[in-house]
Image (spheres, coloured by chain):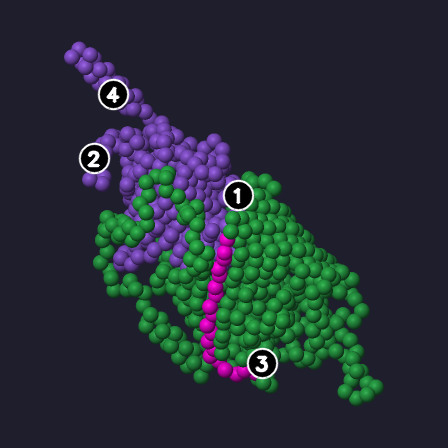
Chain colours: A purple, B green
Amino acid sequence: MAKRTIIWIIGILFLFSASVVSAQMTGKQVMEKQKERHKVKTEIGNEDMVLQDKSGAKENRQVVRYAKEVGKDLHRYLVVFLSPGDIRGTALRTWEKKGGDNDQWLYLPAQKKEQRIAKAGKRNYFMGTDFTYEDMEPEDLDNFNYNILRSEQFSHEGKAYDCYVIEALPANDKKKQETGYAKRIMWIEKVNLTTLKTDFYDRRVKHQKTQLNYKYVNVGGAVMRPMQTIMNNMEKSHKTATTTRSRKININMADSTFTDSFILSGKHLE
Amino acid sequence: MRMNRLLKSLAFLLAVYLLCPPFSWGQADYRFQEDDLLKEMDKAGEAAPEQKGQEKIAPAAAKPTPVLSKLVDDFHGSLRLRGMHYWQNPPEREGADTRNDFGSALFKFSDKIAYKDFALNVGGWVEYGSEENTYSGTSFSEFWQDMDRRRRIMDVSDLYLNYSRDTFNFLVGKKTLTNGMSTLYLPSDRMRPQDLNDPLDVKDLNIWQARLDYDVAEATTLTAAFLPVYQPQKTPSETSRWMGERKQGDSTEFDLYDAGNANMKDDVAKVTDNNFGYFARFKKKGFHGWDFFASFYHGPNPFYVVREEQVPGPTPGTTQPQRIKEVVKVDDYAAGFSTTYESWEFHGEVVYNYTYDRKDDDYFNYVGGFTYTFDDFAKKLWLEKIDVTVEYANEIITRFQNAETYVSSSKKSRLGRNDILSRINFEYNNKLSFQFVCNFQLTRGEEGRFQRLEAKYKLRDGLITKLAGEFFGGQSDSLYGRWQRNDRLILEFEYSF
C-alpha cells in the first residue's frame, strides 16, 4: 500500500513538474520543440485535393509533395500537380535559405521553362488553391515572434484537446513587408505538439482564413502528420481540402529531385 | 459594313459563350460545410488503401503493374476545337484563299513506357482544319527531316529514350530543346524549329538529338547535345492570308514569309556532317538569388539568307536570275540571367551570332525586362493577381553580310530588333483570367504592332475555353503591317486529360 502511495506521489510530482516546465516554455520554445519532434529527413506524399468555390462547384486535383532536409534546418520542397489535364505537370520548387530569401520557381508545362517568383508574388494564391506561395514555404522561426496567448481546451474531431494558443507575429520590418499576414493564431495540442487549427489574419488584421488539420497519424517515431486538412477562406468564400492517400518518410531521395533538371526531364511525372 | 460584321461576329461568339455557362451560375447560396467536403473525399478515397503511416508506399514504388495498364495510365492528351473569324477579306492576290472563317481540330497525345532507369517517350498530334494548302498527309520518307512546307495531319513530334540517374540524364531521339531565361522573347532559344502556318498559333516541330544533362553540383547543370538533323521552319502557303501583301519590284530584303515564295528555290540543309549542330550549356540556379546560363551553338542558322544565281533562261543562250534561300552556318554565343528583388523579377539575355564566310550579318541580339506582381492593388480591383511583364529587345550588327552572290541577309526574319513586348495577366480567380499581350516594333520605316486580348474560363476539370481577339497594324512592309487585314476573333475549347 505504502509502495503504491509513493508511486502515486512520484507520478503526481512528475506530472506537476512537467506542467511547470511546460508552463514556463515560451511560444518560440514550443514551436522549436514542435519542429524538432516532427521533422523528417525526407518525405513524399500523394494527395487528393478538392477546391470548392462559393457556389459549391468543386475541382478535383492530384498532387505529389516532396520534401528533403539538405542541411541543418534547411529544406527543399517540390509540389507537382498530376491532374486534371490542364495543369498536369505544373510544379513549384522551393529552396529554403538561412539568413536570406527563399528561392521559388514555378514550372508551367505550356511554357516548357521555369519562372522565378518574386517575393511579393508569394502573397498570391498558388494555382487557385487557398494556400499562398508563402504558405508553401517552410517557416523560419527566427522571422516571427511567438507569444503564448493562453492554454485552452479545444474541441476537435469530437474530442477536447489541451492546447497552447500561440500568436505568430512578423519579427522584423522586412518580414512585415513581405508577408501576407499581420498575424496567425495557432492551436497546438500539448501532448503530441500537433497544430490542430490556424487562423490567418490579413495585413489589415482581418480574419482571412482558417486551416484545420484532421486525423493525425503516427508516421514513424514520434512524427505525426494529418491525413486531412482544410483551408477555409472567408475572404474568398472558397476552400481547399486535401486528403493524403499515401506517404513515405525517411527514404532515399536524391538532391537532384529538387532541381529544374528533374522537372525538365519529365521525371516529376513518373 | 465592316462594323456590322464585327458586331455580328461578337454576337455570335457571345451566344456561344452564353450557351456554355459555367456550371456554378445560379447557385449563390454558399455555406461552409467542411465536414461534408472531407466526407466526400473520404468516400472517393475508400477504394484506395487507407494510409497508416510509414508502412504505406507511394504509387511510384508500388508493385509492378502490367505494361499495358501502365501504358494506359501514362496516356495523356488534349483535344482542341478552334474557330476563327477574320473581319476583313485578305489582300487581292491571284489564287488567294478569300474566306474569312476557319476551323480546326487538334488532338495531342503523349505516352511512355519505363523500365528501371530507362523511359521511352512518345508524343504527337492528329490535326485537321479548313485552311487551304495547310495540311499534308504523313510522309514517312521525310521522317527524319520534314521538308514539306505544310503541316502534317498526323505526326510523332516526340520520340525519345531517356536514361536517367541521380546526377545525369541522357536522351536520344526527337524532342524540343529549349534555351534561355527570358520570359516573352528569348534570343537564345534558336534550336526550336516551329510550324508557322499560323504564325500566332505555332507548333514545336522538335529536333533529333543526343543530349546529356549532367548535374556537376547542386543546381549546376552542364548540357551537351549533338543535333544531326536540321529541321526547317514551316511557313504559310502562297495562298494563305498570312503571306500578306507580296513585295513588289526589286526589294532585296526578304523575311521568313517571302522565303515561302514558290518562285524562290530552296537550298535545303540536308543531313550531312556539314550540317550537324552542336550545343553546349552551363546553367546554375539559385546562386545567391540568381539564375544564370551561358551557351554555345554551332550549326545551321534557323534564319534564311538569299543568294542569287544566273540560271538558263526560257530561250536558249539566255540566262535569268534565280533567287535561292539558303541556311548558313553560324556560331551562337549566349548568356542570360534571372533574379528577383521585392515584387520584381528581372531577366536578360544576349546572343552573339557569328556567321561563317560573311554569308549573313554578325550581330548581338539582346533582351532585358521585368515582371512586376501586384497583389494588394489587385485585390482592390477584386482581382486575385495582376502581373505585368515588359521587355525591350534590340540588335547591334557588328558586321554586315558581305559575300559574293548573297543579296539578302536574314535581318528581316529576325525578331527582337528594336521591339517592346509586354504581357499583362489579370487573374480574377482560378477559373477566370484575362491576358493582354502586345509587341511594338519601333524601327523607323518598319513600325508594326500586334495586340492580343484573351479571356480564359475553366468550364470544368480539364476543360478550358478561350476567347481572343488579335489585332495587327503598321507599315505595309513590316511583319505586322503586312497582316493588317488579319484582325480576327478566336474561340477555343480544349479538354485535357
Q: Nearer the viewer, residue A225 or B159?
A: B159
In the rendered image, residues at marks 3 and 4 fall on the same chain: no
How would you rate the neighbour count of disc 4 (Cα within 10 Å): few for under 14, some for 14-19, many for 20 or more? few
Is the C-beta separation of discs 3 and 2 under 8 Å?
A: no
Say which quadrant the N terminus of chain B sits in.
bottom left
The residue identified by callout 4 is: A15
Which mark lies nearer to you, 3 or 2? 2
Q: CA distance from mark 2 to mark 1?
A: 43 Å
Q: Residue furthest front?
A: B66
Q: CA distance from mark 1 to mark 4?
A: 46 Å
Q: CA distance from mark 3 to mark 2?
A: 76 Å
B234 left or right of B388? Answer: right
Q: Is residue A106 visible?
A: no
Q: Secondary structure at mark 2?
A: strand
The residue identified by callout 2 is: A160
Q: Earlier in the sequence, mark 4 or mark 2?
A: 4
Q: Earlier in the sequence, mark 2 or mark 1?
A: 2
Q: CA distance from mark 3 to mark 4?
A: 89 Å
